[in-house]
Each structure stands twice: as structure tokens, then as C-alpha cells.
Amino acid sequence: MRRIKSLLHSIYHFHSSIISNSIAAGLHRTMATAVQPISPSNTRLGWIGTGVMGQSMCSHLIKAGYTLTIFTRTQSKAQPLLDIGANWASSPHAVASQSDVVFSIVGYPSDVRHVLLHPTSGALAGLSPNGILVDMTTSEPSLAIEISNSAAEKSCFSIDAPVSGGDRGARNAALSIFAGGDESTVKRLNPIFTLLGKVNYMGGPGKGQFAKLANQITIASTMVGLIEGMIYAHKAGLDLPLYLDAISTGAAGSKSLDLYGQRILKRDFEAGFYVNHFVKDLGICLRECQNMGIALPGLALAQQLYVSLQAHGEGDLGTQALILSLERLNNSSLKSYS
């Protein structure tokens, strides 16, 4: 009996030692991962969607020395990035299988779902444990939460991080980034975010998307006000370049004025942000308003004015093309300034 007790005692201590050592090793690995700063030498990046915004954003990462693997629906559009060192992958899954952090910036929520959550070709299916998804598309908060939950089931992380600043902000690495998700993960990603602009932590999963939607509501009404002011000033016989310069340093000054005032005068409607995508954003905002039980009439008006541009086949123009809608309403034109 004594021999049996002694044997059991030895077995107990042997297993206890193994468990303790395993826990300690696991904690050590976790702590090492947590504190290891992200840098080009230890972090492989992936990028899905190299459109108007993505092109410039990717170029900043490549120039900073990161290994970058990219996928976009039309490979030829990614050629400028391939020429400066990006690697091509044939699918979002292939991007993720070669990356530690995967960014996406695509068009619509349906695109986000497809490139990230598709069971065979999606990025999450190809991501290794502890990998991170960062969706920078303006999308639905509920989808951001779903992606976060799906990532957690795979021992991965997901951050919703939509951006504001348009094509100029992307080129100048001056984007406002609205981040939602695990705060420590957002902080860990900061070395990458700082290459693109300024990151603002907004709260848990989905909060980045809510912040971006509120941002879009503000922009929508600001754009309507800017263009209505221009129509009014034109009808009053004011010199529009002089007028815009005069208001730029007063209370009516705005980022929208800085970004789009001169473009409107020059009839430059090239997309820094597509009308089609803005209508999508404002539609998401209106659905969220209905869910919240709130009425935002300025948002509804702006959305209808932008929808009218789509009705005239102008959805692929930039948001500054709103001037066309107001010109039609007033049987007036600012073409003389171009």
C-alpha cells in the first residue's frame, strides 16, 4: 500500500510539474507576442482591394519596408504596386495564408463578407491563429461584430477601421482612422496605422463603423451647405473664387471646402470618393437611424440628392459632383469658372 501511495504521489508531482511548466511557457509565449512591437522585420502584411484609396495606402507600407501581398479583382489595376515590390496572390485566402495582418478596403458590405468570411476563398479561412483582420471599408456595424466573433472562434483578431480623408488623405498619409475592436490589438497595430494617418480608438467591435457613419452624416450635410452657398453666391453676382477664399478662414471654412471648392470650380469631378459608395454609406446610415429610432432629415435630404446623381448616370463621379444636382434644380450652371 505504501508503495502504491508513493507511486501515486510521484505521478501527481510529475504531472503537476508538466502542467505548471506548460502554463508558464504558454504565458511566456503570450506575453512575448503581446509586447513584441510590429515592424517590417517580423510582420508580413496582406492587402485586399487596391482602388482609389488602397493604391496610395499600400505604397506607404511598401516604402516603409513591409513585405506586402495583395489581391484585387482586376490584377492590372494593382500593377503599379507590383512594380514597386508588392507580391500578388490569387485570392483573399492566398493573401491571408502568407500574412500576419490582412487589411481590406473594398466597395460594399457584400464585398467585405465575401473577401473575409467566404468559407473557402475568404481571408479568415486562410489566416493562422493570432492573425489579425483589419477592415477599412465603410460597412455595417453588425457585420463588423460578426467578423470579430468569427475571428475569435479561430483564435484570431478583427478590427473595424474605416477611414476618412479621401484620395488626398490617402496620398498624404493623413487619413483619420476610426478603430473598433480590442484596444490592445489596436495599440499593437499603431506602427502600421501611423504610416496611413491618425488612428482614433472608438470602442469595441463595430464602434469604428458607427464613428465613420456619423462622419459621413456630417460630411453629407456639409457638402449640401457648401454647394448651396456657391449657387447662392453665383446667383447674387459674386466672384466665386473670391467668395470661397473669403469664407475659407471664417466659420464656414471646412475640410470639404478645402478639398473640393477648387475642384468644383474647375469642373473636376474625378472620384476621390465615388458617389456610388457615398450613397451606399448614407443608405447604411439611414437603416441604422431606423434601428435607433432617430430622425435625421438633413441626412435623408442629402441621400436623395446623391441618389439623383445616380439616376443621371453620374455614380462613378466624385462626391463633389453634387453641384450637378443643385445646378439642375436651379436651372443654373457654374461652368463659366472652369
Image (cartoon, grey):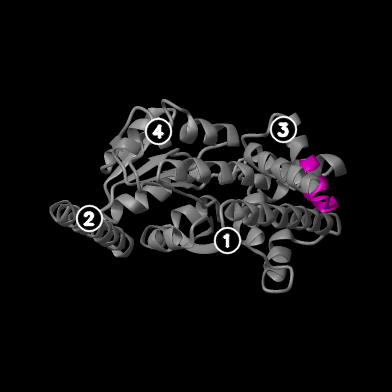
Between the C-alphas of marks 4 and 2, the distance is 40 Å
* Highlighted range, magenta: 292-305
Question: Residue 119 falls in which quadrant of the image?
Answer: top left
Q: Nearer the viewer, residue 329 or 165?
A: 165
Residue that label 1 marks: 203
Q: Residue 218 at x, y = what percent?
A: 71, 57
Question: Which comes before the other along the chain, label 4 or label 3?
Answer: 4
Per the image, label 1 sits on a secondary structure element best described as strand
In-front residue for pair 36/277: 36
Cβ atoms at labels 1 and 2 below 8 Å apart: no
Q: Is residue 167 left or right of residue 277?
A: left
**Tag in front: 4 or 2:** 2
Q: Residue at x 51, y 38 (%)?
A: 106
Tag nearer the camera, 1 or 2: 2
Residue 194: x and y in percent read 41, 62
Does the image show residue 79? no
Query: Which residue sits furthest bottom?
Result: 250
| Residue with the mark numbered 3 | 310
Determine the secondary structure under disc 3.
helix
* Res 99 visible: yes
Earlier-in-chain disc, 1 versus 2: 2
* Residue occupying image coordinates x 63% and y 43%: 142
> What label sits on residue 12 in the rendered view?
2
Residue at position x 49%, y 42% in the image:
105
Cα separation between marks 1 and 2:
45 Å
